[in-house]
Structures are given as C-alpha cells and as structure tokens.
Image (cartoon, rainbow, N blue to C red):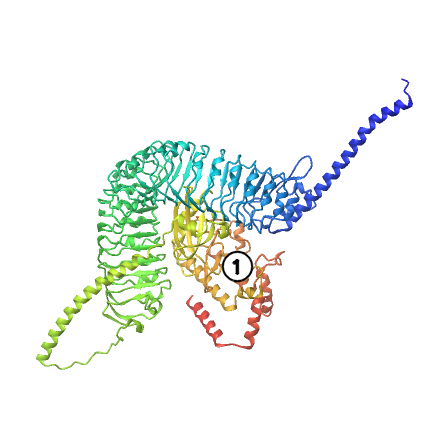
Amino acid sequence: MGLSYKSLLLFLSSLFIPSGVLILCFSSTTSSAISGNETDLQALLEFKSKITHDPFQVLRSWNETIHFCQWQGVTCGLLHRRVTVLDLHSLKISGSISPYIGNLSFLRALNIQNNSFGHEIPQQIGYLRRLEELRLNNNSVGGKIPTNISRCSNLVFISLGKNKLEGNVPEELGVLSNLQVLSIFGNKLTGSIPHSLGNLSQLQRLSLAENRMVGEVPNSLGWLRNLTFLSLRSNRLSGTIPSSLFNLSSIRNLDIGENNFHGNLPSDIGFLLPNIRWFAISSNEFTGKIPVSLSNATNLESLLLLQNNLTGEVPSLAKLDRLRVFSLTSNNLGTGKADDLSFLHSLTNTTALEELGVNGNNFGGMLPDSIANLSTTLRILLLDNNRIIGSIPSGIENLVSLEDFEVWNNQLSGFIPDSIGKLQNLVVLALNSNMLSGHIPSSLGNLTNLIQLLVEDNNLSGRIPSDLGRCQNMLGLSLSQNNFSGSIPPEVISISSLSIYLDLSQNNLTGTLPMEVGNLKSLSEFDVSGNKLSGEIPRTLGSCISLEILNMAGNNFQGLIPSSLSSLRALQILDLSNNHLSGMVPSKGIFKNASATSVEGNNMLCGGIPEFQLPVCNSARHKKNRLTPVLKTVISAISGMAFLILMLYLFWFRQKKVNETTADFSEKKIMELSYQNLHKATDGFSSANIIGMGSFGSVYKGRLDREGTLIAVKVFNLMRRGGFKSFLAECEALRNIRHRNLLKVLTACSSLDYHGNDFKALVYEFMVNGSLEEWLHPPVATNEAELETRKLNFLQRLNIAIDVASALYYLHHHCEPQIVHCDLKPSNILLDEELTGHVGDFGLARFLLDATQNHYTQSSSIGVRGTVGYAPPEYGMSSEVSTYGDVYSYGILLLEMFTGKRPMDDMFKDGFNLHNFVKAALPNQVVEIVDPNLLPEIEEGETSTDSADTGRCKTSSNRLMDF
C-alpha cells in the first residue's frame, strides 16, 4: 500500500476540510439560535411588562427559572426553539401590546382575543413576516389599523372585531393575497369600503359590521368568488347594492341590514344565490316587491326583510322547507284584501320554523285555518298591527311550543278560544286593541309561565275569572277599556309576582277593593280608574312599597284617605279625584307635592297643603239661625236649584277629568324597547360601552335617541348553557324587588337580533356616578382637581351605608320568597347623581328564589360563594347561604368604607385581616386606621362645627331612626 507523503496529505485534506466546514456551519447556527432565543426571551419579558392586570396569574410562570418555551401560552418550534405561537385568549388580562412583539420573528399565530388590552396596535406588528393568524378581537384596542400590517404577506386570518379602532380601513390590506378571513366588526371605523378588498381572491369571510362606514358598496366585492360570508350590517352605507354582489353564487350568509340602502331586490335573486342560508336586509329603504324567485333559494334558513318599504303580495314560499326564521315586520306589504295572508298556508311545509313575524304591515283578510298547521317548533308568532279580521282560529292549540303570541291592534272579533289555555309555554299573550267579545276563558289560568297578558281595548264582558290568580309568574296584566263587571277577584289582586303594571281601568267593576291588594309589594303601576268601585280605600295599599303610579280616579270610594299612602316613598303620581272621599288630606309623602297628587272632585275633603285649595278642617258646630218660614222656603228652593246645577256640572267635569286622567295614565305604560332600539343605543353593543361582565352576559351603557336617556343593558349570552334559564330566573327575581335603594329595572327585551337569533336583555336605570368601588378606590387621576372630585366625605359615606342597609332589610324582610344577595361589595353598589346608593349586580347577580328550601335556586352568573374577602368564611366550607351571610358582607363593606382598605389588601396575610386591623385600633387609635381622605374633615370637625354640618347630621340621624 505504498502511499507517498503527498498522496497521504491530499487524502487527509479530503477528509478534514468538509468536517471543518461542517464545524464552522454548526457553530454559526448555534450562535444564531442562541441570539434568536435571547431576542424572543426579551420580547416576551417586554410583553409581560406591559400587562397591568392578570387575575388568573397566567404570567407567573413567565420567569427565567424555566425555558420560555415552557411558559404558559407560549409554543416554540422544535428545530430552532423560537416562539411560533402566543396564545393568551380569554384570560381577563389587561394592559397594552408591547412594540417588542415585532421581535418575535418566527411568530405564526398571535391570539389574545377576549381580554382587556387597550392602547393601540403597535406598528411593529408589520415586522412579523411569518404571521398567519392575528386574533385581537374583543378587547379595547384603539387607534388606527396599522397600514404596514400589509407586510405580513402570509396572513390568512385577521380578527380585530369588538374593539375601539378608528379611522379608515387601510387600502393596503388589498395586497394580502393569502387572506381568507377579515373580521373588523364592532369598532368605530369610518370612511368607505376600500375598492382594493376586491383583490383578496382567497377571501371567504368578510365582516365590516357595526362600524360607522359611509358611501356605497364597491363593485369590486363582486370579484370575491370564494366569499361565503359577508356582513356589512349596522353602518351608514347608502346607495344601491351592486349587481355583482348578487352574482356571488358561493355566498351562504349575506347581511346588509341597518344601513341606508335603497332600490329593488333582483327578480332572479333566488337563482343567483343558490347556496344562501342567511339573507338579511333589515332596517333599510328597499322598495318594490318580494321576488317570487326567493322560493328557489331552498337552502334558506333565515330570511329577514323587516323594516323596509316593501310592498305588494308575499309570494308562496312552499319550497323553503328549511326556513327557521322569517320576518316581514314593519313594511307596507299587503293590500288589505281577503287573500293577503294566503302565503301563510305555504309555510306549513317548513317543519323547522321557529319564529314568524308579519306584524306592522297592511295585511287584511282573515287568519287562515292553516295557521294551526304551522310547525310545532314555532315559538314566536307576531301578527300585530295589521288589518286582520275574523276570529282567532280554534286550532291554535296545535302550536305547542308557542311562547310569544301577539295579534294586537287588528280588527279581530269573536271569542277568545278556550284552547289557548293549552299553550303551556306561552310567556306573552297580547290580544289588545281588537274587537273581541265574550268573556276571558278560565283556561287562561293554566298558562302558569305567562309573564304578560294584554287584552285591553276590546269588547270583553263578564267577570274577571279568579283562575287568573294561578298565573303566579305574571309581571304585567292589563284588562282595561272593556266591559268587565262584578267585583275584583281577591285571587287576581293578590298575584304577588305583578311588578310592572296592573291595569283594570275603564270597566264596570263594582264592590270594594279587596284587602289582598297589599300583597302587591313589587307592583309599580296600579290603575282602577273609571269603574264603580266603592267602600273605603284599603289601608293595606300602604304595603305596596314599590308603587310609582296609583290611579283610583272616577269611582265611588268613600271615607278617609289612609295615612299609609303617605308612606309610599316610591310613589310619583297619585290620582284620587272624583270620588266621595272625606276628612283630612294627609300632608306628608306624596301629598306634599300638589303637581303629583290629584284630589279634586271630592267635596268633603279638607286640609292638606294650600295648593289643594281645600277648606280648613273644623270640627266645631255652627250655631243655628232662626229663619222665617218664607225665608226657609226661598233658601230651600234656591239650594235645590243650585244643587241640581252643581250635580250636572260635577257629572260633566267628572267624565271629562276621568277621560283625561285615563288618557294620561295609559301613556305611562312600561317602556317598550326593541332589539333595534337597544342596538342603536349601545352603538351596536360596542365593547367600548361595556360596564360589566358575567358568565351569562355583559352589561352595556346606552343612550336612547328619542329621549337621550342613559340606560344600562344586560344582554344574556344564550349560547351558554343555562343562559335562557338565567334570563327567566332573573326576571322572576326582579319582579320581587322594587325598592328605592335597589337598581331599578326599566323593561325587558325578548326579541330577535339581526341574525335571527334569540335576544334576551334586561334594561336598568343608568347610574351616572358609577360604583362605590370607583369612589373608594379611584383610578389614578390626571390632575388634582379630578382627584378631589372623587372623594366621599363622612356624611356621604354614612348615607350610602344607610341606603345599603335599607335595601338589605327590604330583601330579607319584605320579599316573598326571601332574597339573599350573596355578593355584596362596593362594585355592586351604584350611585346616582345625588350619590344615593342602589344595590345592583352588574354581571354578578345571584338571586335566591326560595330561601326556605333545603337547596337554593340560582339564577345568575357565579356561584353562591360570592367574592373572596366579602363572603363569610363558612361559605367556603359548602355551608348553606343565609341572610347572616349578607350581614357579614355588609360589616366588611362598612369597614372598607371608613378605612379605605380592601379586605384583600396586600397588607392582610398570615391570618391578619381587615377585621383584626380595625379591632386592634379600638378604641383609642381609630384616627390611625381611618381613610386618609377623611382626616382633614375630622381635624376640621375638632375645631369647628357649622349649622350646615349639623343639619346634615340630623338628616342622617333621622334616616337611621326611620330605618
């Protein structure tokens, strides 16, 4: 094997040179990986530094004791150990998005949706060239959408919905050729829809809904041949819909509702959109007829044509056997002719139909008998505000799932069918403003789920059936403007669930007002005016502590005005006019307000405040005068004539006054708010308006356009299991709580949203001064003046404490069944403009509907354990809740109010708590533990006392004595 030295050298070189190259390459790769890892580490730590609130302590693992690839929410690639996924969704995290996010150069997916991130999207997001998914929806991110996001050329999915983004949609987005989903709904975006979006050839879903965009829809959107979902709902778009949009044969969901679009629907739309499942054009200005071809869109499940100016007949829809939701509400459809409703017969083939709304049109003719053959899954049937004649079909009982049946304001005649009593699921039955006659069937007493029964303004007669007393879930009952006679059944007058109104006015009811009226402790409005009721006004009316309007005018009530009426602190309007009442008018409570109280037409009343202009009460007898027989005769004749004239005048005046009073009272019915009203009031349920969140829903701040009234809207998440039951249960509980120091519910809304889904919400008074939490622990103020305005002085705190005590006393001792709050804390105490405390429960409500059972029915968003620090310790050991638990929470609340310390303050640990903190300072060191904001007031009080302070102290002292 004789190898020369030179050959051997060449052989060894051939072996080692590649190895050297390999070693060098490996060293270079290792160095790069280490450098990259360090960059990712620093970027993540910078991201963490911008987090201000982490309630689940998710980022606790983000420290250098373990490799960042093992940190919660972080995923790394196997080869380079670089961050590829950052997923921190739905963790209630607050803070801002660090600009250092742009240094995660291997990042493919960023998901921080469903949190509370604020500030802006950093421009550095454009450095993430490998990014495929960007999910920032449901946060509070503001500012503009960065234009350089277009550099992320691999983006497939962008979701920025439900934030506070402003400005235009960047034209630059049109270069993202791989984009399949673009969702930026629920922001404050303005400007027009960019023409460049038509270049996104891979786009499948586009949602620009719930913004403030203007202008016309660009024709280029018709180029998106892969588009299956398009929502432009709730903007300010106008013009006509480009024909190219109706040529998107792939589209399954098309929602352009709540804009200013006009024009006609294409006559061949049913052929152009063969795959359409969801078609919504609601709340626009479309005109013309409903195309007959729609019947060929056989995949349709939801067809929402409501609130437009559509005219003509409704074509047969017999082929739409998958239809689930169909609404024609508030158009000009129909001609008033006999066959207007014939299309309803074609809907008998739609076996999945759940919601049908044809109300608010010009439909005439009779209800076809085939209506009884509609789907047994039908839950909502709205036929009101038309020109329908004839009777209610007797086969209506076949609609066994019906929950809401409304045919009010038509021209229906005949009897109310007994068979309606078989509709066991009915929640709302509205037959008012028709020409129905006969009696109320006693079978209606079987409708035990009924919340509202409206039959006013008909020709009904007979007695009010006592069986209605079995409807123990009723919140509102109106039987007014009929011909009912006989006495008021005690069973009806004592339906304790009634909380909105009970209106029996303008009938021929006789007899006395039953003493059982005192059971209506939750009732807000009570009207028995314009009847023939007699006897004394029951003193038990004083137990109706939630009454705001009481109208008893135009009857034959006699005797004294019960002084108990003056104790009704919630009472705002009282009308006792045109009766035969006598004696002294009380001078306290509502009787101190002449503009809110009417007592005229009672000639034997005396006293009261001067504004009533009644004679002074005097029990002394007048001396007898001796009169000649002639003078007696003359006086008798004159008196008789005067009496006759007076009676005629009083009769005329009484009828006039009763009519006026009834008209005024009827205008004060419950506030009726539709989904559209609430959607508009809350700016499309914008996340910017969220003021509270819970497991079963969110609470939004809203402003009603028609009055400018601020409201709080609790929207229930019906997709969550138990959400619908929570709504019903909370309604059940709210009917029992009406008190000046409990948050007032204004109305409930049970409707459809713009997608045809069920929508349930409760509307409350809005408390302008927020929660007690914000006053006791205000956020960092921007200036000294702002900080000063967020301080509560001693007397204000004392009055709020009394308000809360009053509310708890009511819940524990005046509610049947007894209610235990279970989550009393500063954030659940809301303050009105006068800093009066109202116990509420935004998102955290827990109503216990039966405190006498061995278990408790729960109806809101969290467990009955309450909040740590405020709930009694025994709740943590599965102890049954009781009123004592509320008293414990109230004690903690008092300590927090006057020390300014939260029970979970960092100083409390190792067995040392707020209770011990206060106890240790008693009795000689109280000043050392009192809230520092109160110290100047205490020091000033040691040296001076003015009359104003004395007056305020007396007021608080009197309130304590009243309580």
- Where the N terminus falls, by quadrant? top right
Q: Badge 1, how many Cα within 10 Å: few under 14, some, many 20+?
A: some
Residue at 51% over, 57% down:
827
Vertical side of 265 occupied by 541: above or below: below
Amino acid type for the residue under numbered disc 1: Glu
- The spot of residue 365 in percent (x, y) is 24, 41
- Hey, which quadrant is residue 25 in on the image? top right
- Where the C terminus falls, by quadrant? bottom left
- The spot of residue 650 in percent (x, y) is 19, 66
Residue lying at the far top in this picture: please name it.
1
Q: Nearer the viewer, residue 743 or 906?
A: 743
- Hey, which quadrant is residue 363 in on the image? top left
Q: Is residue 55 visible?
A: no
Vertical side of 673 occupied by 953: above or below: below
Seen in the image, is 835 located left or right of residue 413?
Answer: right
Q: Nearer the viewer, residue 536 or 759?
A: 759
Write down the residue under mark 1.
Answer: 773
- The spot of residue 902 in percent (x, y) is 57, 59
User: Is label 1 in a helix, a strand or a loop?
Assistant: helix
- Hey, which quadrant is residue 612 in on the image? bottom left
- The spot of residue 716 in percent (x, y) is 44, 47
Seen in the image, is 720 located left or right of residue 468?
Answer: right
Residue at 40% over, 53% down:
734
Q: Nearer the viewer, residue 947 or 469?
A: 947
Q: How many marks?
A: 1
Q: Is residue 206 visible?
A: yes
Seen in the image, is 338 located left or right of residue 122?
Answer: left
Vertical side of 585 occupied by 763: above or below: above
